Image: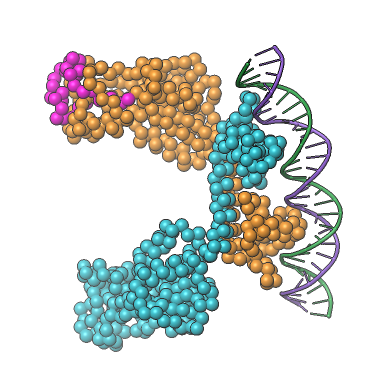
Chain colours: A cyan, B orange, C purple, D green
Amino acid sequence: MSVDLESLRVLAAVVSEGGFAKAAEKLNKTQSAVSYQIQKLEQRLGTALFDRSAYRAELTPVGERILAEGQRLLNQAQYVSSLVDQFSEGWEPRLELVVDGMLPSAELLAVLKEMVELKIPTHIQLRVEYLGGVQQRFEQDRADLMLALEYRPDTRLSSQALAPAETVLVAQAGHPLARAQGIELATLQQHVELTVHDSSYSKAYGGRQTFGGERVFYLSDFRAKKEALEMGLGYGWMPIEQVARELADGSLVELDYQGGSRHRYTPVLVSRLDLPLGRAGQVLSDKLLARFGEQSADS
Amino acid sequence: MSVDLESLRVLAAVVSEGGFAKAAEKLNKTQSAVSYQIQKLEQRLGTALFDRSAYRAELTPVGERILAEGQRLLNQAQYVSSLVDQFSEGWEPRLELVVDGMLPSAELLAVLKEMVELKIPTHIQLRVEYLGGVQQRFEQDRADLMLALEYRPDTRLSSQALAPAETVLVAQAGHPLARAQGIELATLQQHVELTVHDSSYSKAYGGRQTFGGERVFYLSDFRAKKEALEMGLGYGWMPIEQVARELADGSLVELDYQGGSRHRYTPVLVSRLDLPLGRAGQVLSDKLLARFGEQSADS
DNA sequence: GATACCTCATCAAATTATCCGATCAAGTGG
DNA sequence: CCACTTGATCGGATAATTTGATGAGGTATC
C-alpha cells in the first residue's frame, strides 16, 4: 500500500506551516526528516506533490488533491483513536437491543434518533423479534436490553414494567365474522386465524395463546399481517394503535367475541444484573422508560 | 497519533485469516512480526484488542469496533492511492468551469450530474459569473473552461460557438410600459431598468449595453432580477427560457420597444490552447457541446 | 553587488523500528 | 500420550527513519 499516515501528517504540516523547516519545527523533527518523508511519499505515489522550481516549494495540483484527501484520512484516524478514549470513559463499543415487533416502531425509532443526535460513540444494534423469539434472541446474542411482551423471569435479569399496551381482535369489514354477534370460540375456530410467527425456533417457552383452529396462517410481521387482514384472508389480534385508523374508517372491524375482544399486555424492559449496562445502555434505558411510560418497578 | 495503517492491515488480516500464523503467511511475514504489530497497536491504543484467555485469540468488543473503523480507514487509504493512478492515466485532479449565469442552469446541472455519474476522479469546480465577469474569472483563476456570452478573443484561446440564446425585454403586466406601444428609447429611460450586475470588478471590457437611464437597479443574479420584475419594480432583459412561463400566463409582458424587444446572444465555449484539457475536461467539453447545441467551429 | 539569510536537497552516521528464527507454555485432538 | 496447534517472547539481524552538517540556489537589504 502506498500511503502512510505519518507522511500525510508531514505533508499537512508542510502546507499548513508554509515550509519544510517550519513544519519540522512543529513536528519536532529536523528539516531533513521532513524532506525525507515528503520524498518517500512522492516516490511511493509515483508523482510529484511539490513543485520545487520556484524558491519556495509549492503544491502541484495533484499534491493539493492528495492533501485534501489525506486530511480526511487523518480526521478519520483521529476519530478511531478518539473512539478508544470514549470506550475507556465508560461508553460501550456496542449495545444490542431486542424488541418485540408488536411495539409501536415509530416511538422506538424516535428514541433511537435521539440517541444518534447525542453523538454517542456506541454502535446500537436493533433486533426485532416476536413473542418468545425476543427473549430467545436476547439470550442467544447476550444482548444488553430487551423490550418484550412476555418474559420468563430469571434471577440474573432485572425487569421494569412499562405502560400496558392493548391488542384487539379484528377482521376485515367484509369478513363473515365481522357481522356476527356474541361469537363463541367454536365459531372462531371455523375461520382462518392470522398470526405473526413466533420467532423462537424451539417453542421452548410457551408462545402466546392462539385459538388453535385448524387453519392458522403465520405471517412474518405485523405489516404483512395487517395487509392480510385488510384482504379479508382471516381474523386476528392486532396492536390497537396499528389499526386505529382502519377501525375508525371501518375497513377493519372489532369482533364481538365472547371471550373478550381486547387483550392487555404489559411490556417489560429487561436488562442483565450480571453484566451492567454501559453509559449508552443507561441513556437508552432511561429514554425507553420515559417514552414507553414508566410503571411500578420490580426485579 | 495512535493509529497506523500497517497495524490496521495486520489486524484485518488476523481476523479475516482467522489467526496470527495464517495472517503472517498472507502478509508474507513471520508470526512474531504479526504478534509484534498487534501488540504495538494495543499498546498505542491503550486497550486490549484480543482476548487471549482462550486457546485462540478472540476479538474483544472494542477490538471489533476498531477493526470496523479500521476497515473504513483502509478503504479510504486505498482510494487515495487509486486517485494518483487515475491522475497518471490522464485524469486531471481538478477542473474549473466558469459559466455565465444567464445560461440555463438546469441544463448545466444535468451535464454536471452526468459527469458525477461517470465516477470521474476529477474535482469539478463551477463558478457562476455575469457578462464580463466570466472572462475575468476565467483568466484570474486560470480556469480550464468557460461558457460565456461575450468573449474577448485571444490567440491562446480556442472557442466554439454554441446554439444562440435569446433574451427578451419584459416588464410586469401592471407596469406602465406593459401597455405602451411603439416604445422609444427616451420613454424607456424614464423608467427604472433592472439589470444583473456585471461581475467584472474593473469595467475593463465593455459590459453589455444597458439603456443607461437615470435609474438602474443592479441585482445580483437572474433569480433576484426575475423577482424584482414580477414585483413591478422596473423593466429589463431576461433569457427567454427563464420567463417563458410568465409570458405564457401573462404575469410578465414583452415590451413593444422600437429598437427590438428581442436580443440574440451566441454563447461560446472557450478553452486554452496552451494548457490542453485533461480527460475530464474533454468529456465535459463534449457534453456541453452536445447539450448546448454545436455550431460552426472557429478559433 | 556584497552580505546575511532564507529556501529545500543531499549525504554519511547514529538511532529506532521492525522483522526473523528459535524456543516456550498452554491447549487441542486423535 | 503424542503430535500438532496457537500465540508470546527473546536476542540478534535488517531495514527504516532521523540527525547534523553541508551545499546550491533564491531573496532581501543596504
Residue B194: where, in percent of width, then height? 25, 25
Q: Is residue B142 left or right of residue C18?
A: left
The residue positioned 75% from the left and 54% from the top of the image is B29
Compared with A183, B74 (above or below) is above
Query: Does B176 lie within the magenta span?
Result: yes
Compared with B12, A270 (above or below) is below
Q: Which residues are magenta?
A: B169-197
Residue A44 picture quarter: top right
Q: Is residue B22 visible?
A: no
Residue A99: where, in percent of width, then height? 42, 71
Query: Does A31 lie within the magenta span?
Result: no
The residue positioned 57% from the left and 59% from the top of the image is A84
Residue A230: where, in percent of width, then height? 28, 69
Compared with A293, B178 (above or below) is above
Q: Is residue A188 left or right of residue A97?
A: left
Q: Is residue A221 left or right of residue B63?
A: left
| B48 vs B65, nearest the viewer | B48
Residue B188: where, in percent of width, then height? 19, 19
Q: Is residue B226 visible?
A: yes
| A132 vs A231, nearest the viewer | A132
The residue positioned 53% from the left and 74% from the top of the image is A275
The residue positioned 60% from the left and 62% from the top of the image is B63
Residue B255 picture quarter: top left
Q: How many marks?
A: 0
| D20 vs B198, nearest the viewer | D20
| C15 vs A49, nearest the viewer | C15
